[in-house]
Amino acid sequence: MPCASPDVTPDARLADVLRRVISAMESAPGDGCPVCAQERLEWHTDLERYPLQGPVCTDCGIVVPVSVLTPAALSASRRYALADRYAAV
Ligand SMILES: [Zn+2]
């Protein structure tokens, strides 16, 4: 499971995280993080390994596979990323 940062890791054990992500992939797309269930995801384009961009959970820090998210959740994550970028200018 790729993480955006080595400093941010889910609280759950890796096996639990993987199981939740896999079960999310096997069911219908959702609106939030498959691991901790919160809905705030930020689209990052500067990840240091594959995938180089994707939605990152702001709570547990995992890179959420695009296939487990609804189109609405994906566009929301992109909005968060843009909002942060312009807020800093
Ligand atoms: Zn999470």
Image: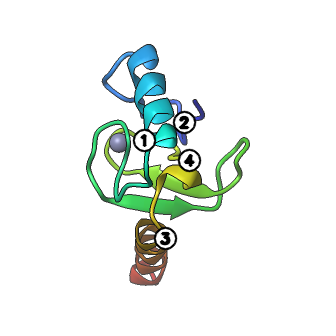
In-front residue for pair 43/30: 30
Q: Amino acid at mark 3?
A: Pro
Q: Amino acid at mark 2?
A: Cys
Q: Which residue is mark 1?
A: 61
- For the residues labelled 2 and 1, the Cα–Cα distance comes to 6 Å
Q: Which residue is mark 4?
A: 65
- Give the mark toward the camera: 1 or 3: 3
- For the residues labelled 1 and 3, the Cα–Cα distance comes to 20 Å
Q: Residue at x 49, y 50 (%)?
A: 68
Q: Which residue is mark 2?
A: 3
> Mark 2 vs mark 1: which is more N-terminal?
2
Ligand 1's image quarter is top left
Position in image of residue 45 (x %, y %): 64, 61
* Residue 7 appears anywhere in the view: no
The answer to whether marks 2 and 1 mark residues whose Cβ atoms lie closer than 8 Å is yes
Circle 4 packing at 10 Å, graded few (<14), some (14-19), many (20+), is: some
In the rendered image, which quarter is residue 11 located in? top left
> Mark 2 vs mark 3: which is more N-terminal?
2
- Give the mark toward the camera: 4 or 2: 4
Badge 1 marks a residue whose secondary structure is loop
In the rendered image, which quarter is residue 3 located in? top right
Q: Amino acid at mark 4?
A: Pro
Q: Which residue is mark 3?
A: 71
